[in-house]
Image (cartoon, coloured by chain):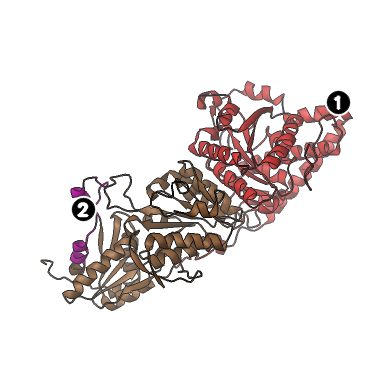
Chain colours: A red, B brown
Amino acid sequence: MAKQKAGAAATLDPSAACAPEWTEILRQMIFIRRFEEATEREFRRGKIGGYLHVYSGQEAVASGIISALQKDDIVFSGYRDHAHALALGSDPGRVMAELFGKGTGIAKGKGGSMHLFDVEHGFYGGYGIVGGHLTLATGAAYALRYRETERIAVCYFGDGAMNIGSFHEAMNMAGLWGKEGMCPILFIIENNGYAMGTSVERHSALTDLSARVRAYNIQAEKVDGQDVFAVRGVADRAVRQVRETGVPYCIEAITYRFSGHGAADILQPYRTKDEVEQHKHRDPILILRNRLAEICGLTDDDVQQMDKEAGEQVAKALQFAEESDPPEAAELWNDVVAEHPPTPENHG
Amino acid sequence: MAEKSYRDAIRDAMMEEMDRDANVLIMGEDIGVYEGTFRITAGMLKKYGSKRVIDTPIAEAGMAGTAVGMAMLGLRPIVEMMTMNFAIVAADQIINHAAKVRYFSGGQVDVPMVIRGPQGAGVQLSAQHSQSFESFYAHFPGLAVVAPATPADAKGMLKTAVRGRDPVIFLESANLYGMKGEVPDDPDFTVPFGVSRVAREGRDVTIVSYSRMLQLSLIAAETLAAEGIEVEVIDLRTLRPLDLQPAYASVSKTHRCVVVQEQWKPFGAAAEIAASITENVFDELDAPVVRVTGEDVPMPYSRALEVLATPKEEHVIAAVKKVMYASTSS
């Protein structure tokens, strides 16, 4: 076994269920759920504009993978990106302020829900064109190895992203660069069963999504994405392997989103209420909570306390977002380019 | 100074920058082992190795997108598009990603990358391989768009592009690759973006152009000079940022203006230039601005038809005479 890299998250043995880190992971998952519920309320109140895609139901995939990373690893995601930013340690107040379109937002109010971005915490963005960011993450991984660092890139994407050309181009190039040990990237398929409202059976000619990744000479395995013990177990192994070899790896996390595709997806004609209810029996928070109760005596009071604290944190984030000012008008013209910026008088 | 071809000026710029900065690398289709379709990258794989001279699959979105990621993480990738026609495959990566990520991240990342390659018509490559894209890319905030007309500018502006902090679309004219001109030897010779130049002085009519059409305009100006018509020719060099001040100054002197571009007339670069001249120096004009452009059809293969579709010296001369309200019988 290779030596643990300095600063690496320790491998978390599922049998050591009473390790304090598992409690922290539960705390984080509960917080992400409360945060997302609040964003849905604030969207309905008109405080959040644009599109809003919440993560409820998939928390084990964000927390299980990101908790296995080193501090200086980097993460790319699609547009369902709040959980990734929060799990990486982004300030919840600034994330909420971004959703509120405030100047204190994590991207100065210029990106919104789909484009959270926090380089300081290793988050290289939420991206809104399905599958487009896979190529960026692949290039970023090349850069990390080119510069002779031991950092790795993680790239989250949904099952729906696997049918666009840039998925195939990224996978093929990652597979090729991996042969030279030049592509330390961990691809995470968040297979929640639906590309918006089109089920995997209806959008993918081959429904074994991991097999489609393996076609590009990239190792891939499936994991129960509702069970954070399982996710973290695979992540520990995969992260170490990618870091040591510079060869890409893929985890297909089978998961489920409890809310609609976006906040406007109210009728959800592509699935039944019964189907959603069935999946709620496999709520990742419930699964982890039951495991911790069973193995190390986590009590209902403990969970209620976590819930209460999460609610308070969310309230604080909401207050920060509410009380922050909108961006200054001059911000409109900032950050277009670094050099030769356009101005109101001289476009381009 | 040394006499160099436009092709060699581009290669020199890349190699000097690769020598200067280990973060500069180049990727593209058949640029390494094959040494490039237009041989711009000849010898580079041998000198810099396969980590810095990356032969990619035929995957333009992959090339452009990975370059964005590399640039965000501190490298300075140069992407060679075999021709700019193929770069449309990467439009999402260029327009939705390279051009936007600085803005939607609130300025958290630089994207120092260059997408370069040849464009334009003239060698019987038919409809899919003969297009010009300057107005397409110049439409989008977040990009710089460069179209050099001389070997010196090709070298100096490519070095500026590589050293910068933003994504640059570097449009080469395939027809100019063999053109020779004086190029400074100084490895720190650069040409800034957004600074147009007066390529030829004259008092009667202003021609505004760039890239290969700039050279065509200079040839036309020479012919017109023999007839006693002195044309001032402005070389824009970059379409974004766009410096029209020398054009405005020139029009204020000549009071007549022709804009020459190879691409199609509707919504082309000349339309933007003509509109800006009208907005800014309307009172100086003694005649409407006239555009010389390619014909509004996909490029045909047959030489007999292709020559009819592209601007030629006679079109420029006719346009100059038109704005002078002169006879075009010659």
**Quadrant showing the N terminus of chain B:** bottom left
Give the numbered dot on residue A131. none
* Residue A105 % position (x, y): 65, 54
Front-lying residue, B19 or B27? B19
Which numbered mark, 1 or 2, is in the foreground of this view?
A: 2
Identify the residue position indicated by label 1 in the image.
A294
Crowding at dot 2, Cα within 10 Å, few <14 / some 14-19 / many 20+, comes out as some
Q: Is residue B314 magenta?
A: yes
* Residue A42 % position (x, y): 65, 44
Marked residue chain, label 1: A
Q: Is residue B290 magenta?
A: no
Is the residue at mark 1 from the same chain as the one at mark 2?
Answer: no
Q: Residue at x 29, y 54 (%)?
A: B266
Q: Residue at x 50, y 69 (%)?
A: B187
Q: In which quarter of the view is residue A291 placed?
A: top right
Q: In which quarter of the view is residue A22 placed?
A: top right
The type of residue carrying mark 1 is Glu
Q: Residue at x 56, y 46 (%)?
A: A136
Cα distance between the residues tagged 1 and 2: 82 Å
Q: Label 2's element?
A: helix
Identify the residue position indicated by label 2 in the image.
B307
| A212 left or right, relative to A306 | left
The type of residue carrying mark 2 is Val
Q: Which residues are magenta?
A: B294-319
Instruction: Kindly tell me whether residue B198 is visible in this rendering.
Output: yes
Instruction: Kindly tell me whether residue B136 is visible in this rendering.
Output: no
Q: Label 1's element?
A: helix
* Residue A167 % position (x, y): 53, 37
Q: Is residue B134 above or below residue A299?
A: below
Marked residue chain, label 2: B
